[in-house]
Amino acid sequence: MISYISLIFYMIAFIHIILFLLWGNKNVRSLFNIFTGTGLLFNIADMALRYFNTGAAPTSTLYDVMNMVCISFGITYFILYAKYKRPLIGLFISPFMVAASIVSICFPPNVSPSYPVIDSIWRYVHLPFIVLGTTFLVAAFTASLMYLIQEAQLKKKNFGFIFQRFPALDTIANINNTSLQTGFYLFTIGSALGFVWMLQNNLEEILSSEKIIFSILTWFLYAALIILKKHKPMTPKQTAQWTVIGFILILVTYVGVANFMLR
């Protein structure tokens, strides 16, 4: 199965980014990008083949959704790497790709008939925006962790290999801001399209849906964070702390999504 091949490449890539953290060798950094990119291509090939063989959209099963999550993480990493040339972003994103690959394998890839509302075109349009927006918000979370770790190293005057490998605080703050804003805009588009999809059900179901409730909470948290940053300057540390809180809400949201799809 192609998903197993992707998982192998992601695991090898994760090993290489750890080696890069320890050694700082540029060849190891290049190998990390190669292995990650190869795993990403296999994920894309898997999605394309499943579509041509079954005719089902790449959101028909949890296997497909987790495959999309892997692809979104890969796209997020390479966009941020192209902009900032900081491979250690992958140190935190790579474990998510490995985890998503493992989870996808745990679910059967068989496509079963869905209810008419589940087959709505709005679902197929909104879910990619939600997933890609979420992976950018996860990237903001990882950048926040990098910032807090690097700041702690600086305060302790611990200038070891972690301090030397991690980007400067200003660069990490920029990565966080870019990821946060991009993720928020994509998440907003996906949420709006998802609301149109949910309107095809009755209002009572919309108001009682865990997915909608937690999505709205997540959106409002990030909206408040971005508004505060614009109108009341926040320190990078405060931004990092609030981003971590937002990530916790994202995890809760995804639990709600999983429960919704397994009903």
Image (cartoon, helix red, strand yellow):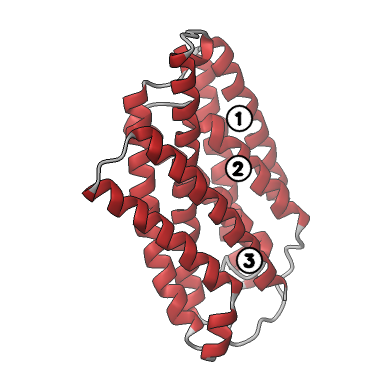
Q: Quadrant of the C terminus?
A: bottom right
Going 60% across and 72% down the picture, which residue do you hit?
A: 210
User: Are the residues flagged by discs 3 and 2 in contact, CB closer than 8 Å?
Assistant: no
User: Are the residues flagged by discs 2 and 1 in contact, CB closer than 8 Å?
Assistant: yes
The residue that disc 2 covers is: 97
Secondary element under disc 1, as helix, strand or loop, is: helix
The residue that disc 3 covers is: 256
Going 64% across and 35% down the picture, which residue do you hit?
A: 9
The tag earlier along the polypeptide, 2 or 1, is: 1
The residue that disc 1 covers is: 13
Q: CA distance from mark 2 to mark 1?
A: 10 Å
Q: Horizontal and vertical percent for residue 110?
A: 74, 68
8 left or right of 194 in image: right
The tag earlier along the polypeptide, 3 or 2, is: 2
Query: Is residue 155 or residue 22 the one in the foreground?
Result: 155
Query: Is residue 3 or residue 88 the one in the foreground?
Result: 88
How packed mark 3 is, by other alpha carbons closer than 10 Å (few <14, some 14-19, many 20 or more), is some
Q: Horizontal and vertical percent for residue 33?
A: 50, 30
Q: What amino acid is labelled 1 in the image?
A: Ala
The correct choice, above or below, for 116 with respect to 166 in the image is below
Q: CA distance from mark 3 to mark 1?
A: 30 Å
Q: What amino acid is labelled 3 in the image?
A: Gly
**Which callout, 3 or 2, points to the residue nearer the camera?**
3
The correct choice, above or below, for 150 with respect to 132 in the image is above
Q: Horizontal and vertical percent for residue 227?
A: 28, 54
